């Protein structure tokens, strides 16, 4: 049985992890930043020195193709649909070196092992690194959305990047344009399947002491930017019963919405992550509280129920407390079911390899959920120690990653032969 | 019976209110800012043209003295203790034109009326405008604290102003130094009593439809800067029951502390006014929530009880939710009892004048509470429409202010003759 070389994979991860290393010990490598451009050049050289055919599409998605036996690398795509494995190499600001990179470089390692083996491929196998999975530009999954032709011109032109500059500006330092992004899907090969290895970014696998998670669904999510509005007043002279304290409205809503989801919708999530209280000073009762509010579920029906119940709750709290409540939708994604054919293959291969595994949902979004709209897609999770990600403290145990990459390898071999 | 001239007082208030008028329609005139220096020059000219002896002490407190009959204006203080009335002319950022100014200019108007009358004074009467009541420099009440010699050199040198520059820097554009502030109290006259007219800054008088509040106590307050600390984690992958969400700790504390004070300590106040949640983004469970926490009461015993009960509550919430809690004291003032002799005089004069009045506590701090440490002090409140202050929408009804100023005038005449 083929095996990946964990030392080689580790060297790759550590090399890539040094690009964009920031002063807080994390990695800051958002798409099309200077470190990202450096990382792209590095990945290209790794793909080429592995003897794969390097290709980049109009959205900056990077591919390395291993052609089926008999076809020369880089030759015209044969009729057979391609098998793809990958993830992304961009990071959040001050993030870690494994989120995304582990999936791209594990796939690259698998392709190196397959290439050096006597496995006879029936179809091309590609490693993929999708642009801006983390959404530092204009929403999550720019690259995989472009790959499927799911983006609209108006969106790319109108939406501001998180740097407060339009996307067109950011693209000036790259080989890409809004037009090339919109046309990227015309260059995309037809896919047989897409596999993505990723760190769990949660505490479940570690808690269960299991090295492999096989993802069977990706949660849908609903993001809103909300406000309670009351009346700012003097905190020394406005009796408690006469206040219209916008922050207490938010506090009430955060607690009650959490309690409702925890007790009636186990497994779903609700979070207030960002809070701005105005005017925001000692001695002044808050007149306005703006906040991010999100909920996630693996069930489309639950998402619909939560939308109704939670915003009714917010309206009730506002009415009871003499406040106003308003919100606007920031993002919505539907839950994604993972291909049962692929999860079955992953399960069988785990058995063969003797690895314990857990079928589990993914609460975070991944490129795989976008790809799942067009092909069979599946994900392999490896444990995140302490559940930590998007942080300089994000890490992975090498023995877990080795197992995850070997599982990816066996699944690719099985699907490609 | 003497009467103040409300038109003259209104013209003064409107003139002063134009100095430091900001683009949001409010007044921004913190002590020693350019508009404040202009306002000081304007006040000096008003004092001098009223025929009063202008004086400024080392802390920038401005006085206008009406000498007892027989003494020439500006001559050496006679043995008789002085009677003082005043407030402050500095404002919060984007504040209103009545908070402070109403008290200074009503006192000035009273002195003009007394001077023009045939009232024979047994003691000097002074109008006072104390520096930085609003605490834009180094804590509230710089001027009145300096007037009583209550400031420490280390405090003035170490504490940063709210502009992020040391006080010594700010003083460079004035005639004052840290040393002159520390020595200001050596120039202070001995006081018979201090009276302060002020807008209520709360909704009570308007709610009761009463034009005059006679303050019988000033609340003590306790200011802390607090933090709940948990663990930032991915909002899509960290199950609700495994989270250490610092913001939910704060939400819980804000609601429960408010409920406790509202139900068990009626009339006391508790407020969370400023909130900073970190890292503060969609998709991230808050790892830290910093916030201002304050409570106020007219009873020293209640303040002590609240300090114990509320911070025990915070510790309990932290323990239950797997969070840390820490706090540091920002400011503490004791409740101040107002002189019964003076409130009795004010009450009697209200009866004579035929004005309805309400005995009431003051939740906000005022220079009078500092002066009360050294002399009999009392306050007259006039209604704040909609309870609004510290805002461009702060206002006063002229007929209420006329009543308040006439009451001040009668009380001054009674105390000075």
Image (spheres, coloured by chain):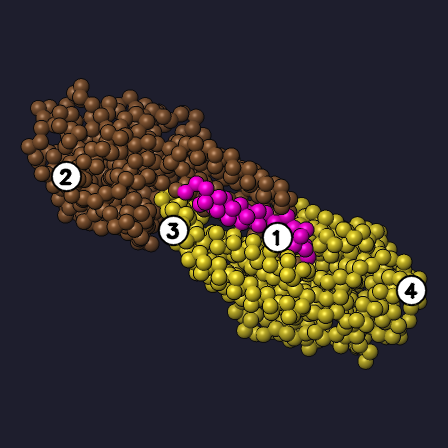
Chain colours: A yellow, B brown
The chain identifier of the residue carrying mark 4 reads: A
Give the magenta-colored segment's residue range: B237-266
* Residue B30 position (above or below residue B79): below
Q: Mark 2 vs mark 3: give the one in front.
A: 2
As drawn, the residue found furthest toward the left would be B118
- Report, in whole angstroms, how far the alpha carbon at label 1 lies from the one at label 4: 45 Å
Q: Residues within 10 Å of mark 1 (few under 14, many from 20)?
A: many
Q: In the image, A158: left or right of B163?
A: right
The residue at 45%/58% (across/down) is A320
Query: Is residue A300 among the parts visible in the rendering?
Result: yes
Residue carrying label 3: A242
Chain-order first, disc 3 or disc 4: 4
Residue A91 occupies quadrant: bottom right
Query: Which of the labelled discs sits on residue B315, or is there none?
Result: none
Residue carrying label 4: A117
Residue carrying label 1: B285
The chain identifier of the residue carrying mark 3 reads: A
The chain identifier of the residue carrying mark 2 reads: B
Q: Position of residue A388 (x, y in %)?
A: 70, 50
Query: Which of the labelled discs sits on residue B352, or is there none?
Result: 2
């Amino acid at each position: 049985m083929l095996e990946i070389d964990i030392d080689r994979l580790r060297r790759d991860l550590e090399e890539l992890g040094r690009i964009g290393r920031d002063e807080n010990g994390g990695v800051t490598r958002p798409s099309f930043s200077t470190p990202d451009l450096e990382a792209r050049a590095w990945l290209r050289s790794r793909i080429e020195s592995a003897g794969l055919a390097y290709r980049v599409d109009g959205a900056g998605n990077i591919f390395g193709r291993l052609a089926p036996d008999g076809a020369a690398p880089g030759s015209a795509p044969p009729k057979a649909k391609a098998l793809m494995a990958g993830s992304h190499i961009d990071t959040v600001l001050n993030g870690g070196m494994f989120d995304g990179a582990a999936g791209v470089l594990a796939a690259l390692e698998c392709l190196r092992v397959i290439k050096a083996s006597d496995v006879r491929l029936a179809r091309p196998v590609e490693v993929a690194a999708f642009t801006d999975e983390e959404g530092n530009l204009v929403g999550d999954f720019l690259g995989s959305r472009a790959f499927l032709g799911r983006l609209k011109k108006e969106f790319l032109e109108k939406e501001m990047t998180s740097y407060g500059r339009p996307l067109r500006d950011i693209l000036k330092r790259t080989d890409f344009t809004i037009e090339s992004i919109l046309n990227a899907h015309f260059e995309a090969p037809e896919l047989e399947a897409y596999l993505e290895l990723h760190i769990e970014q949660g505490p479940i696998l570690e808690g269960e002491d299991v090295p492999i998670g096989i993802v069977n669904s990706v949660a849908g999510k609903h993001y809103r930017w909300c406000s309670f509005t009351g009346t700012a007043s003097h905190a020394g002279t406005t009796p408690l019963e006469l206040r219209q304290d916008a922050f207490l409205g938010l506090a009430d809503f955060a607690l009650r919405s959490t309690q409702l989801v925890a007790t009636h919708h186990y497994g779903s999530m609700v979070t207030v992550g960002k809070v701005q209280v105005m005017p925001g000073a000692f001695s002044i009762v808050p007149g306005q509280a703006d906040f991010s509010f999100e909920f996630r579920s693996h069930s489309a029906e639950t998402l619909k129920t939560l939308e109704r119940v939670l915003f009714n709750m917010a309206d009730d709290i506002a009415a009871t407390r003499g406040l106003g409540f308003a919100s606007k939708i920031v993002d919505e994604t539907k839950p994604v079911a993972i291909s049962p054919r692929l999860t079955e293959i992953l399960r069988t291969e785990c058995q063969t390899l003797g690895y314990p595994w857990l079928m589990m949902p993914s609460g975070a979004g991944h490129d795989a959920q976008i790809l799942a709209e067009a092909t069979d897609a599946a994900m392999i999770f490896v444990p995140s120690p302490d559940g930590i990600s998007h942080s300089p403290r994000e890490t992975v145990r090498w023995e877990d990653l080795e197992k995850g990459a070997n599982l990816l390898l066996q699944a690719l071999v099985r699907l490609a032969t």
